[in-house]
Image (cartoon, rainbow, N blue to C red):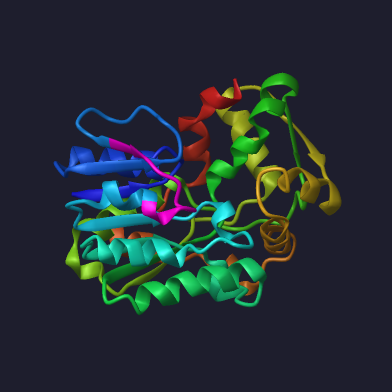
Amino acid sequence: MIVVTGATGNVGRPLTRALAEAGEQVTAVSRRAAAVPDGVRHVVADLARPEELAPALEGAKALFLLLSGDMHAAGAHPADVIAQAAAGGVRRVVLLSSLGVATRPFGATRIAIRAVEDALRNSGLEWTILRPGGFASNALWWAESVRTQRLVAAPFGDVGVPIIDPADIAEVAAACLLDDRHAGGVYELTGPEVITPRGQAEAIAAALGSPVRFHHLTREEARAAMAQSMPVELADDTLDILGSPSPAELRISPDVQQVLGRAPRPFADWAARNVAAFR
């Protein structure tokens, strides 16, 4: 049995579906009750209280560990989840980490995530670490303004990074959970191209078949908006990358191709599949 945390999110949902379709027994974990695919067991648990995860881990051989932004806030102890998994008899953990651990290791949130990686490496469990860059699904922040005003408002409109489709992350995670060859691997996951926020707006417009205007936000405006849904430190770290990506953050990684045997999907593909969110 495989346990998927964050099972109702942009990565967890397609991962849960892929594992179920592969014939695996799957337990989906989320903080709230939610619909899951037929045959999948669902457990409500808050990873901020690792003891709540114990029922989900009964009989589990593997765990996909996705730590939400609040798990990196002051007072959180995400490494306790790994200890809980080890105590529950889990053999393998696939951790969704962050590319920033390698590219900006001294940011507060990156230090916290690195500590989780280190705890996993030292746990005695089999492990694989996934380090994605920015997610294509972050464009859903613009869904309401696109629906109501045909407007995308973002900072750093002409600065791009190679964002990754969450469906690709899910496919890589499934491969790592199911195939022993990926044990001990650290994979950097990016899309196939550098794309700017303005370019994303154009791709959404193409998917809609309707023009979408672009409005430039200041860093301060973007920070205030992001801080409503994530720790301020994480918002600052994210804006640092979006505003001034390093050469390592502009690098297009070969790792999706290596694991899946195909190139990662471009942003336009994600926009076309998710166009209903912007209509």
Determine if the magenta segment contains residue 197: no
Q: Residue furthest front?
A: 51
Q: What is the quadrant of the C terminus in the image?
A: top right
Residue 261 in sight in this render: no
Residue lying at 32% horizontally and 41% vertically, measured from the top left: 28
From which residue to which does the magenta span run? 42-51
Report the residue at 52% width, 51% height from top.
Answer: 68
Based on the displayed image, in which of its 4 quarters is residue 259 positioned? bottom left
Q: Which quadrant of the structure image shows residue 125?
A: bottom left
Q: Residue at x 73, y 65 (%)?
A: 244
Q: Which residue is drawn at 24% across and 57% down?
A: 62
Place of residue 267 in the rendered image (x, y in percent of width and height, measured from the top left): 53, 44
Residue 118 placement, left or right of 25: right
Q: Which of 14 and 71 lies nearest the eye of the viewer?
A: 71
Q: Residue 147: x and y, percent?
A: 67, 22
Residue at the far bottom: name it: 122
Task: Let me know if residue 51 appears in the view.
Answer: yes
Q: x%, y% of residue 43?
A: 33, 39
Asked if residue 233 lies left or right of residue 268, the reply is right
